[in-house]
Amino acid sequence: MGVMSALLLQLGQVGLVLLVAPAVSGMIRKMKARLQRRIGPPVLQPYRDLRRLIGKDVVLADNTSWFFRMAPYLIFAATWVAAALVPTFQTGLMFSWSGDMIAIVALLGVARFLQAAAAIDTGTSFGGIGASREVMIASLAEPAMIMVTFTVALVAGSSQLSTIAEFMLHSVGLRVSLGMALVALVIVALAENARIPVDNPATHLELTMVHEAMVLEYSGRHLAMIELAGSLRLLLYISLIACIFFPVGLVVSGAGFLAYAAALGAYGMKLVIASVFLATFEMSIAKMRVFRVPSLLGIALMLGLLGTLLLFISEGM
Amino acid sequence: MRVLLIGVAVLLGGSLLSLLPLSRESKSSVIYGGCFATCLVLSAMALVGVAGDASSAVLPLGLPWLGAHFHLDALAAVFLVIVNLGGAAASFYALGYGAHEHEPMRVLPFYPAFLAGMNLVILAADAYSFLFSWELMSLASWALVMAHHRDAGTTRAGYVYLMMASFGTFALLLAFGFLAGPGGAFAFDAITQHVLSPGVGAIVLALAFIGAGSKAGLVPLHVWLPLAHPAAPSHVSALMSGVMTKVAVYAFIRIVFELMGAPAWWWGLPALLLGGITAALGVLYALMETDIKRILAYSTIENIGIIFAALGLALAFKAAGMGDAGALAVTAALFHAANHMLFKSTLFFGAGTIIVATGEQDVERLGGLIHRMPISSSAFLIAALAISSLPPFNGFASEWLVFQGILVSPHLPRMALKLLVPAVGVLLALSAALAAACFVRAFGAAYLGRARTAAAAAAREADVWSVSSMVVCATLCLLTGIFPGAVIDWMQPAAVALVGGRMPPQLDIAWFSIAPVSASRSSYNGFLIFVFLVLAASFAAWVVHRVASRAMRRAPFWDCGYPGAGPIAQYSATSLAQPIRRVFATVAFDAHEQVDMPLPGDQRPATIHRFMRDPVWEFAYAPVAAGVGWMARWMNRLQFLTIRRYLSAVFVTLILLLLVLAIWG
Amino acid sequence: MSAFSLDVAHMFAGGLVLVSFMMLYQDRLFPLINALSLHSFLLALSVAWQAHIQNTPDLYVTALISIGFKTLAVPMALRRMVEKMGLHREIEAAVRTGLTMLVGIGLVGLSMDLMLRVTAGASVLVREDIALALSVVLLGLLIMVTRRNAISQVIGFMSLENGLILAGTGARGMPLVVEISVAFSVLIAFIVIGIFLFRIRERFDTVDVRALDSFRGERR
């Protein structure tokens, strides 16, 4: 395969995640509405929201600095790069080796750092409350994520997502550790994407909110960037779970046109299924108090650690 | 070798120079300028010296039958670069910052001596000159800590520091005694020939932990560090935190990896455990502080923990005969040591500019400095991102290497190590996430938001020297972050010497990737990540500005409909740490709060009290202090004896010593 | 033995450890009882699988006992007990949950390190089963130690017993007689504890075992 087509595939992946991300958010919103017996906004509503936001003037709070204006673009860039590093339809893309799972976690960490700092820059109490809770949640979610990485890397012998996916595609028996890692990863994903039960993406004016409190002072194109980054992060976690635990349909590279079409179709199906699960889950559970969240994330951390320990038993033979 | 020693002599001469009757300004700029130039030359020499052959020299100083041995090998060269780059940056910074010193004569004579001491520790190749240089370093830094001796708390800091430093040196003295054995061969060459029995090895290991660990700030020997580092002038704080702790790490590596010979399998255990605990506790302490320099000092403890954990991993690999994996871990430790020097220097320089600009070091009384100090705040931001181990900066590259080392650990033969290492990995991940929280908080409270006091509102950007020193260090943070392969390759001779293996050459890999074991296993490319980030951000900004309205209005903040709250109603640093305090510090520090909320109609003000206890101080130091007090009271009786009793005490002691000699002699 | 059958055995045994952790975490009574059911059910599956791969049909009896007795009967009885006594649904833990979990992880690590070393010569299945079984036993003890409520202590005890059975089946099957006698002894223990519970309840109006301490005049 020539360099050009490799580059094209890589660019295709980069563009794909950006294009699909808002649709996934819209799909989940729609499903939740249907489950609540509402009609709900159309699936493509997030795109319209983005267009509307981009067209609007930016209203900046008096005090905010250049950092506050730069942050949305950097947050978006970090999330986008991270999302593009997760295999969606093909493994082993041209630049897939430029970061492993740890680097992806860290890129999301960059976005979070900037987001929290920008929230403090508003000089308001809501910005601070959101930032302080976000970093608290992250301080537990990140070790859990590292443990998941460790478990998976121990099984697959690599922390590189493409290699992991190819390994999982071929040869894995039943591993209770992987099950634990999956549950842990799902919990982390819920926490990092500010979904119920950790945070409520649809809420405003509530003392329990975390993520929304941080972006309260953003408007116009800045808000559009942050919203898009949020959708990308959700897509990233869905792709991550799909690529590690359900790699069915991934193209290994150098396959024909039909295989690519099938891979894209499989990816679409995975997104729909994940959305159904997420919507149903969010419908059937209540939001936690903020200080219950640490014990939830503690479970994720414990599952990750336990998964690794159990692996040693089966590997140690 | 000769040039290096001459450089050190020049530094020592600088101390004497400060005694000449020159004007204050010229003296300050001559000394700092001279230190800057000398350090730059020394670091350039060492930079080349890593790959070169080892060289040594013996000077007719010190003990007459021993002489003073000096030696430059790859390990020493790596640390010389760390020391002298840090020294050069601090000296350059001080060209501007030193002008604000009230009593320059309390700083100038000791500053070059401090630099010389650190250089000599690294060059020393026999126990005597090592300990002599170590004491020179300790005493010079103690004098620098005491520079602002009139400030509250400085005398206590100096006292605790002096106590801990003497204690640490004492431990090292004993360690060298055991290492040299009864023959008393104090040159390092001779020591390496001497094989230790397992029991003695354990004792020497413990002593090395106490001696080097107390200087580096390993929990529970860290108590002096957050007192002493902030008390010194800021450029000295940067040196103490960024450089002197690395000299202690060097001492640990030299003793444990080289002088003690082949490691037993369990030698890595204490380093791993203490490192992990130090990392997590250090940053947790930092999160509870509001004094910016104390925050930075505690974060130094955290980074020392990361370095020690990596060293423990390297020891475990070395003992298991896994040379290449050991090289990975040891490179991670060395790389992190170099990185920490870069970003911690930047951060302390930033703290210094804040203190000069506002006269405040409590972040609760700052805020909004980003408007008035744009350049130094950007440098501080970059260093904060780097120390939070976030890509594409250098902190992430080295932390990533540590995690890669942990990912190799399942191949270790011992089950106990296998089980422990992932737990240490959790502690390191926890400390990385908490470090990000800590620096969001420190950066946010000091530079972002609205000014909380008039002093913060009147701040001005610092002088050219200080700012450019910060900018250079921050740039180096970025450069080593996007080209980590160059640094890794450069460090390999040291790794080969220490663990007998090496990492695959990194610069051969396309696109400046780094791949610690093999590319299919894991790789990271800071350069591409950086390029992608820049491209993505500029693409987004370009598209948005093409399509969107570029209009922008300023308006009062909305804050969910609670406008008009004054700057004091912003989220403070203490409140930013509140969730983390509730989650972690209730366990670690027994933190709790007492809220007194008056009923409606009651005129009392509402109050909230926080309580916290330092477990290390209460369990490790308070009993010792009480014991010493008790001993002192008891010994006090000796002061009121008759002459005859004194004489008989001397006599009994003499007889006892003679008896000892008669029995064992 | 095929890799697949090993994987399945590993999955069930690992699942047991996981459910033990769920019990350790759970701070409400009914979910705790459900977790016990799940625990015993997993044990039954694990034992049945062992019976299948080791070709020892008498282990099926053990599995049946586990399903009938510990998955259904005991939890039902416990549930009735809770309802009858109108207990608070929340259990007061004596130690913080997070700390307990950490200790639990440490115990699992310890038992693995120990057991894998002790059983160095044995077959893979045995080593694995025994290491995990010891973890389950230790976790059961931990549950008993960290809870103040007598019912949760009973549950901890039952999960401990499950761990013992897991160890027994791993070691090439316990003789059926031993198994049945163990089951009976547990039954008797259960009855004794049940009576004991009602007696405490009658006398002290609570099932918090601290009431016993004060009765003995130990604390306060």
Image (tube, rainbow, N blue to C red):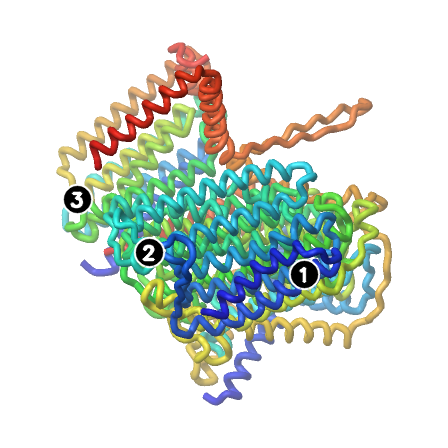
Q: Position of residue A148 (x, y in %)?
A: 44, 56
Q: Position of residue B455 (x, y in %)?
A: 81, 47
Q: Amino acid at mark 1?
A: Tyr
- Identify whether B408 is placed above or below B631: below
Given residues B377 and A270, the one toward you in this image is B377
Pointer 3 residue? C171
Query: In the drawing, what numbered circle is on residue B207?
Result: none
Mark 3 → mark 1, Cα distance in angstroms: 70 Å
Pointer 1 residue? B93
Residue at 52% over, 66% down: B6
Quarter occupied by the C terminus of chain A: bottom left
- Identify whether B497 is placed above or below B642: below
Chain containing the residue with disc 3? C
Mark 2 → mark 3, Cα distance in angstroms: 49 Å
Residue at 44% over, 57% down: B250
Chain containing the residue with disc 2? B
The answer to whether any part of residue B249 appears in the image is yes
Left or right: residue B122 versus residue B659 is right
Left or right: residue B415 versus residue B235 is left
- Asked which secondary structure carries label 2, the reply is helix
Callout 2 crowding tier (Cα within 10 Å): few <14, some 14–19, many ≥20: many
The answer to whether any part of residue A35 appears in the image is no
Mark 2 or mark 1, which has the lower sequence index?
1
Query: Are the numbered discs 3 and 1 placed on the same chain, yes or no?
Result: no
Callout 1 crowding tier (Cα within 10 Å): few <14, some 14–19, many ≥20: many
Q: Amino acid at mark 3?
A: Ala
Pointer 2 residue? B259
Given residues B101 and C18, the one toward you in this image is B101
